[in-house]
Amino acid sequence: MKSLSTNEIRQYWLDYFADHGHMVVGSSSLVPADDPTLLLINAGMNQFKDTFLGLEKRDYKRATTSQKCMRVSGKHNDLDNVGPSPRHHTFFEMLGNFSFGDYFKQDAITMAWDLLVNKLGLPVERLWFTVYTDDDEAMRLWIETGAAPERVLRFGKKDNWWSMGDTGPCGPCSEIHYYWGDLDKQVADGVNKDDEYLEIWNLVFMQYDAKADGTLVPLPAPSVDTGGGLERFASILQGKDNNYDTDAFVPIMDRIQQLAGQSDAERQANLYRYRAIADHARACTFMIGDGVLPGNEGRSYVLRMILRRAARFGKLIGFDQPFLAQVAEVVIDQMGSHYTDLPAKEAYIL
Ligand code: GLY
């Protein structure tokens, strides 16, 4: 298996899909452009919503992105899991490849397998695949591509139907899960249930536009939207069983420890608080970088809530002075090579 830093994984992904005819498109702002159904960007496909719906034409039919996302409100909300969970974040980067009426299930599955197994070297004996209840085609394609039949499982709407909100593009999906426990202890029953089974990539076969009354109107053409968790890939490719032990978070947590003047034992005793502060520092850095200011409503309220949570966790571990700007410096330092607007706006953000 390859060993890659978080920055290298992002680049590897974009290069792989560029080599397969995809346009590399920059992340959109966390603030949705002109979409009243959405408070904050929650998936890579958001910036392509109108393209899937056939309302906007682009001069490419395949795209790849690493998208800044937040899941703190609405249909996708992970806030309460941040800290105790080894893998949930308010802010995260979603890696994606998209087909706008170009390829569909066959190529989406073949490329996913090729990238994960042939290129990155993930062991097939740790991978599990899920398909929507009646999606026989996806089931067959995974098996033809190389998956062992007993490792392809069917799940219902809760797990294998994806929509960005109550309305808009949606469709059946097929997920890839990575098992990181003892090899001989894995069982099909653990998928979508136990923490040792990590969902790493979701391939959505976009087919419908969900209307407010629940009607599913077929999209102009079957399309593909995928979402892979960069921080989760980093945990696998760096041999860590949780995202906070990867190079995306360790330097941030080291800075918190250094500023707090705490021992390793004190850091361990306050682990969930360190994780939440590190997560929230990333979220605040990117939200402020994208022009959100703390306030009483909407996304401004989300930012204020996250800032307050970070400050409160800081207080609980012993800070009695502002500290978050110094933590944000590390975020900008780590991610500024890809998100070049961060260093450009550093003074403002801090
Ligand atoms: N749009 C795919 C996902 O968020 O999983």
Image: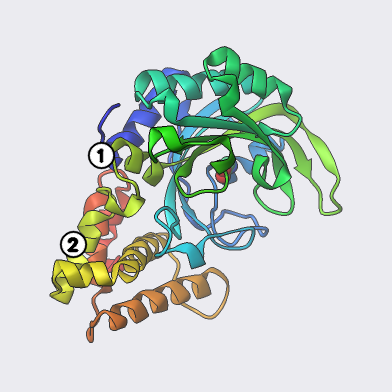
303 with respect to 47 (left or right): left
Mark 2 and mark 1 lie on one chain; the one further toward the N terminus is 1
Residue 163 in the image: above or below residue 134: below
**Residue drawn at 26 percent across, 34 percent down:** 4
* Label 2 CB-ligand 1 distance < 8 A: no
Q: Residue furthest bottom?
A: 320
* Quarter in which the C terminus is drawn: bottom left
Q: In the image, is the residue at mark 1 within 8 Å of ligand 1 by its beta carbon?
A: no
Where residue 242 appears, as percent x and y from the top left, is 35, 50
The quadrant the N terminus occupies is top left
Q: Nearer the viewer, residue 204 or 121?
A: 121
Work out whether residue 32 can be spotted: yes
Rate crowding at label 2 as few (under 14), some (14 to 19) or many (20 or more) other CA atoms within 10 Å.
some
Q: Is residue 346 or residue 303 the one in the foreground?
A: 303
Q: Secondary structure under badge 2?
A: helix
**View quadrant of ligand 1:** top right
Q: Position of residue 192 (x, y in %)?
A: 57, 45
Q: Amino acid at mark 1?
A: Ser
What residue sits right under mark 1 in the picture? 5
In this view of the protein, which residue sits in the foreground, 140 or 95?
Answer: 140
Residue 254, numbered label: 2
